[in-house]
Amino acid sequence: MSGPGSPVVVLVGPMGVGKSTVGSLLAERLGTTYRDTDADIVAAEGKEISDIFVNDGEPHFRELERQAVRTAVAEHRGVLALGGGAILDAGTRELLSGLPVVYLSMDVEEAVKRTGLNVARPLLAVNPRKQWRELMEARRHLYTEVARIVVATDGRTPEEVAEAVLDSLELKEA
C-alpha cells in the first residue's frame, strides 16, 4: 500500500501510450498535481530526450532517468508518470515495489496510430514497427512485474482510461 509519503498513482508503459494525457486527467480528477520524470530530465538538462540520446548516449540518459525517478518518488505526492524505459533499472523496479503502479498497455497497431512511430522517438528510428515489438517483448514482463494493475488503452479515450484507473485502484475523485 502507498504510504503518506508516496505518489497516489504511478503510471508506467511504453512511449505513446498516453501516460502524460491520462496522468494529467487523473491529477485533475483527484485534486492533486501531475509530474512526469521525462519532463523533469528535459528541464534539468535543458535539452530534449532525443538530443540526450544522440549527444550523450543511452547509458547517460538512463542514469539521469534513475535519478529523476528516485527524486520524484521521494518528493511527489500526486500522479507520477515514468518514462517508457524507466523500469529497465532493477533499482527503480525495487523502488516501485508496494506503490500504486498502473501499467498502461497497448498493442503495436495502437502504437502506430498514436505515435506514427516517427523519428522523434530515438529508440524507434530505423524500423519502427519491428523495434516497437522488440522493445515491448523486452519490457512487457517488467511493466507487469511492477504494476498493481494493468489497464489496456486500445480503443479507449484518455477519459475512459483514467476512469478505469480510478475504478481499479478504488480512488475517489476530488
Image (tube, grey):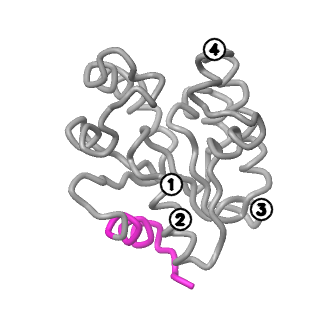
Residue 97's image quarter?
Answer: top right
Q: CA distance from mark 4 to mark 3?
A: 33 Å
Query: Is 162 contained in the magenta span?
Result: yes
Q: How many marks?
A: 4
Q: Which mark is residue 24?
A: 2
Please name the amino acid that badge 1 sits on.
Ser
Q: CA distance from mark 2 to mark 4?
A: 29 Å
Q: What span is in magenta?
A: 160-174
Along the line of sight, which residue is nearer the eye, 112 or 147? Answer: 112
Residue that carries the numbered disc 1 in the rendered image? 20
Position above or below: 31 against 155: below
Please name the amino acid that badge 2 sits on.
Ser
Labelled pair 2, 4 in contact (Cβ < 8 Å): no
Q: Which mark is residue 5?
A: 3
Outermost residue toward the bottom in this view: 174
Percent of width and height locating residue 75: 79, 55
Position above or below: 89 against 8: above
Along the line of sight, which residue is nearer the eye, 35 or 56? Answer: 56
Labelled pair 1, 2 in contact (Cβ < 8 Å): yes
Q: Nearer the viewer, mark 2 or mark 3?
A: 2
Name the element at disc 3. Answer: loop
Residue 29 seen by the camera: yes
Q: Is residue 54 left or right of residue 161?
A: right
Q: Is residue 174 left or right of residue 121?
A: right
Q: Name which of mark 2 and mark 3 comes first in the sequence.
A: 3
